[in-house]
Image (tube, helix red, strand yellow):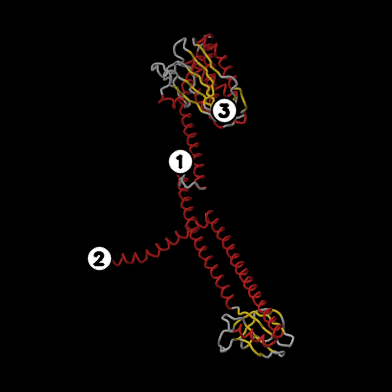
Amino acid sequence: MLWQAVDGTKALSIFAWPIFERHEQDTLMNRLGLLLRSTAVRLSALYILLFALCAGFLVIYVTALSERLLDQQTRDSLQQEVHEIQGAYDRGGVNSLLKLMERRMRQPGANLYVIAGPNGQFLAGNVSAVQPGILDKEGWTDFPFTYSRYLETRDDRPHQALANVFELDNGLRILVGRDLGEPTKFRILVRKALMVALAIMGAGALVIWFAIGRNALKRIDRMSAASKKIMAGDLAQRLPVSGSGDEFDRLSQSLNEMLERIEKLNEGLKQVSDNIAHDLKTPLTRLRNKASDALSDDDQDRRKAALEGIIGESDQLIRTFNALLMISRVEAGSIAAELSDLDLSAIAADSAELYEPVAEEAGYVLASDIEPHIAVHGNRELIGQAIFNLLDNAIKYAGDDGSEIKVGLKAVNGELHLSIADQGPGIPPERRADAIKRFVRLDESRSKPGTGLGLSLVSAVMSLHGGRMALSETNAANAEKPGLTVTMVFPRARA
């Protein structure tokens, strides 16, 4: 049985191995397909193709340039030889010509020299034979020709040369040529060097291409995995940032900022929904009860009073929804185009003057310390509404009768600080963040009228104007009544 089990295991391994191998091959092909479809790899391939074309053009250009340079040097050298030989013949005749050519033939790396008669018969020279027809025409040969050297057999490889043929006045024909072996070797050497350099650079480019494409594919895979988690509902998930500062990081940072904004709006929506359900349930219940009482009561005076109470509750609900609508419009930026240059000093002074009788009626003193001619770029209606909300809160929670409420405006370190300060109980530092949230009321007894949207609206207005809202204590030394100072911080308007 043990032997059968071992054989079975071997058989299973034998059958499973091809399946595993095919799976690995399919996985590799899929990853290779993804790699080839990625933008980074396609761009890299395009750059490599462009580089190959430029390198190929460079090889052809350098090779052709070197050939032309070597050909020109050969022709200049042969032309100089022709002038010297003709000069020797003019000075001393055939004897001087033969002596010069004999001396030149014996030098290392000598050129090709041939003296032939009028009928083309070889008379002297350092080559045994040249291609037929070369000595029939004067001037430069139209193309490289073949020739044979002395002591060579028929099996030896023929040589090629370039020559200039000229005829003397006595009928002799002189051929002065140059073997093309060394220029050819040099040309081949240059071409090989360029090809090797091209091959090395191409291999390096392919390695870099593969590395960049693989790295880009991994980063895209990580971004795709994070995106799937986000689509599954995990808004706390963020796209990975490698810290390299490239386009992937910039895209991830932008999307992460968008996700943070969406998460914040989603949390705000959830909070608002919960607060609306909690805070509007009571007034709606009162509305229903008053309507039921008015319907069942036959007394006209009580019915009228109940209807007036219903109207008051309805007005409060309308104000609540108007405040919510305004906050939503401000946060959405739908009224950002209505901004203009304003005199913030005049707005603050008019608001203080408007609320001064209201404060006196409530038993408080409203003072102001406003610097004149301070301008801001903003929306007059929203800024005025924000100031009204802060003055309403200050009058509600100003503390004892006779205490002071102060409206201040001044420029501080390039910013504009518009503050409303009271002498009331203030807001503890640990609860200031909650006080800005919608429908949050720190008065647990709900004895003061309001909706809990005042500071939320002020915060939204300041965000629209590129500023912020700050909460601080008016009298830090008074632990019982530290007071509250709400400061609207505006950026200074540009001239």
Residue at 62% from the left image edge and 31% from the top image edge: 337
Work out whether 9 lies above or below 135: above
Q: Amino acid at mark 1?
A: Gly
- Closer to the camera, 262 or 9? 262
Q: Position of residue 86 (x, y in %)?
A: 70, 81
Q: Seen from this angle, which residue lies furthest front?
A: 91
Q: Nearer the viewer, mark 3 or mark 1?
A: 3
Q: Secondary structure at mark 1?
A: loop
The residue that disc 2 covers is: 2
Of 237 and 82, nearer the camera is 82
Label 3 sits on residue:
492
- Which mark lies nearer to you, 3 or 2? 3
| Label 2 neighbour load within 10 Å: few <14, some 14-19, many 20+ | few
- In percent of width and height, residue 356 lies at 54, 12
Quarter of the view holding residue 88: bottom right
**Residue visible at 37% across and 65% down in the picture:** 15
Dividing the image into 4 quarters, which one contains the N terminus? Answer: bottom left
